[in-house]
Image (cartoon, coloured by chain):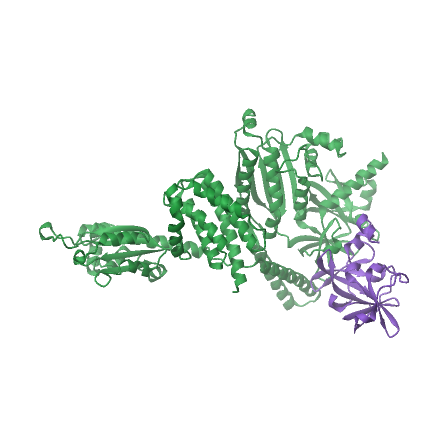
Amino acid sequence: MEYLTFKLDNDEFAVDVLKTREIVDLRAVTKVPQSPEFMLGVINLRGSVVPVIDLRLKFGMAKGEVTQSTSIVVMDVLVNGETVVVGAMVDSVEEVMGLDDSQIEPPPRIGTRLNTEFIRGMGKQDEQFLIILDIDRVFSTDELLMVQGVAETSSADSI
Amino acid sequence: MSMDQYAETFREETLELLSELEVSLLELEQRPDDADVIDRVFRALHTIKGSAGMIGFDDISTFTHEVETVFELIRSGGMEVTSELVNLTLTARDIIKSMMEMSFGGEPVAPEMMTRLTAGLRALMPAETAAASDVASDVGAAVNAGSEETTYHIRFRPPANIYHRGIQPLALLQELTRLGRCRLIAQTDSVPELDELDPELCYVYWDAILTTGHDEDAIRDVFIFIEDDCELKILAINDDLLDSGQGERLGDILIQHGDLTQQELDQVLQEQAKPKLGEALLKAGVVSGSQLDVALEVQAEVKKRQKQRQVVDEATSIRVRSEKLDSLVDLIGELVTVQARLSQATAEDDNPVLAEISEDVERLTWEMRDHILNIRMLPIGTTFSRYQRLVRDLCRDLEKDAELVTDGADTELDKTVIERLGDPLVHLIRNALDHGMEKPDERRRAGKPEKGTLHLSASHSGAYVILEVRDDGAGINREAVRQRAKKQNLWTSEMENNDSELINLIFHPGFSTVGAVSSVSGRGVGMDVVKQAIDALRGSIKVSSLEGVGTTFTIKLPLTLAIIDGLLVEVSDEKFILPLSAVEECIELRRSDVVNANYKTLLQVRGELLPYLRLRERFELPGERPDIEQVVIAEVQGQRVGFAVDQVIGEHQTVIKALGQMYKHLRGLSGATILGDGTVALILDLPPLVQEAEICEREMVAAQS
């Protein structure tokens, strides 16, 4: 399988390349009031309104500085059984690489800063670890609800 | 076209026919003798049967055939229309619909239902026909299926010695009449005087006007044994004849029949003083009365056909998948956005040529927008028949007597709105009949007519459509609402004096005044569901009611969901759109006015105190508010409310884009739109904003006291 890799802080992440649509430069984001901080807002993507998420904030990292290489990875994500186009803001996009399943190990129970729910596995590339994300989980509404503070027992169970 | 496409077309057409059938049946119930209605029912059944057979849905075809047989019998006068028959046929219609849905992946139909229905229908038929119908109509149907009816003029002049050859012309003519609806006229002008008459010769010839589904060959077949010896003219009164322009004028018809020569005609025409040629010809003795009859009949048929064709021509339409229209709406949405950008770019650039082009593009875009949105508009009347049926069936179940009167069936609404309006309307009608409408004896005691009336009306009002569901039933019981409200802690002392606030409590989630749950309504889905559905369409619903007199629900809906006129405003560098249709005026609010006002959230406009809310505070936007704020005053659910913003920018053609799943839980915003500079602005959803503000205020007041 092929993966698109990108960087957040010093960590390298990967998503299934088939999930991604395109990579666009950071552009004017319209804030949507009363939504969690990691939900940056919406952008105009050739006439469509696409929500954008700051992955750093989503993963509990410090807010990053916007640089030349800051990009938005536009992806098809399954939310409540419906395909939704979502953008993820990342520090920089690295490359597309092939990884065999044998090169992927199950997610570690400890030692990562982020919710292991989001991790599909760990890949290894030239002594550098890659965190392979289960992007549908990252964007699941339970997660969003939880942050919005309206979640009930169902999402509490999943933590 | 692939088979799937045929099947899909069949499905669409059949659904249409089924709803036509429903309408016709309900009409038939009112006027059981109306031959036109009987014909319509028959034709609908016939077409369904025919096309189902063609497409290979034999089960539908066979079943429909059973029902059609009954109506064939009614049409020929062999049977009467009874209400039982209408009931059975309506059920049959439902079964046909289920069968079709089954073929397209729906639930299977219980075979015993079909058997029971068929048995019921047969029981209604006169005994001998019921038995015979199996065979006889099968044959007829096989020939008839799929072909359209044509009217022919046939002139049959047998050889004079026909009796010598042992052929009975009567038998031939009888066979001819069996082909369809036939009028025979015997022409006796060549019968000689009695002393010259040879009784063994045939002097008579016949004209027939035959309307049949068979073709010309079938007619010729009747005369096959003597075809070579007799004179047989068959003229189809069809489109070819119409196109040739012949058959319109009586003289032409007679000449064509050979009853009149051009010379004779010219002569009579010269002498003719009166406009009626027929009378003149008769007087001149050049044609006989019966010859004229035939010609007149042919002429009438031609005229009828011309009229039909005109109707068909006028109604020329094409069937387009609604997805295609949807994508067209999307495209025009993008075009409107791009056009806005173009206008903005031109405004910044001082180029008169470009400005002119930009204005043209703007004009064209807006025109196109209107046209495209118009294509999606459907008359709401298409759904009314469904409610007729609903009322009828409910009345039977509830032992009530009520009539649904509809008004404004041609009011047009966006297709999507109509579709999503179905369930709420069904709910309202159910409620009206179940809770509102009294039983006939109760109504009599109350001095009302036993038959209740339920009004469903639609009308335009600016950019809105107003729908009204009005009943003349018992009205909403205030005491019951009050009790219930107290029980659910919704009661406030203000409601004592404000009746409208009290009865509008019925839209509150989980509110129901009826103790027992009936099978018809009150299944735990309350009026709040109706309200939600209407809210989702960006509409509003209000109720007014007089005890003992009736209840009226008024629904106000926007014409279209895709593009609205908006008012663009700015608050701390963020742009928002308010639906312009709600906006009444904009006023300035000085900082000094605010300080002076006693009540913080009230604002004085020409002596009237209005509540207002600050978008900056509501959306927790950063920055200080300017010295002079702008307040947009809008009507929200019958109430004037102000929205304080930094700046009012102006009108904006707003193409509504959904915010989608990710922002599903957000209240107060109904979507987003793209502005001329390419950035995104959010569209405000006013009713929830106001509601929230009211709740906040109430909590604050409660906390203070």
Residue B191 place in picture, x, y as percent: 15, 52
Pick the residue in front: B56 or B395. B56
Residue beneath the point at 41% across and 56% down: B145
Residue B288 place in picture, x, y as percent: 20, 52
Query: Looking at this rendering, what residue extends furthest in the top direction?
Result: B445
| In this rendering, position of residue B507 left or right of residue B697 | left
Residue A71 place in picture, x, y as percent: 80, 67
Pick the residue in front: A87 or B605. A87
- Residue B273 visible (yes or no): no
Seen in the picture, residue A112 relative to B210 is either above or below; the reply is: below
Q: Which chain is purple?
A: A
| In this rendering, position of residue B89 left or right of residue B693 | left
For the C terminus of chain B, the image quarter is: top right
Residue B230 place in picture, x, y as percent: 22, 60
| In this rendering, position of residue B329 left or right of residue B483 | left
- Total numbered circles: 0
Seen in the picture, residue B282 relative to B697 is either above or below; the reply is: below
Pick the residue in front: B366 or B447. B447
Q: Which chain is green?
A: B
- Residue A143 visible (yes or no): yes
Seen in the picture, residue B445 relative to B217 is either above or below; the reply is: above
Query: Looking at this rendering, what residue extends furthest in the left direction?
Result: B195
Query: Looking at this rendering, what residue extends furthest in the right direction?
Result: A111
Residue beneath the point at 63% across and 46% down: B557
Seen in the picture, residue B212 relative to B691 is either above or below; the reply is: below
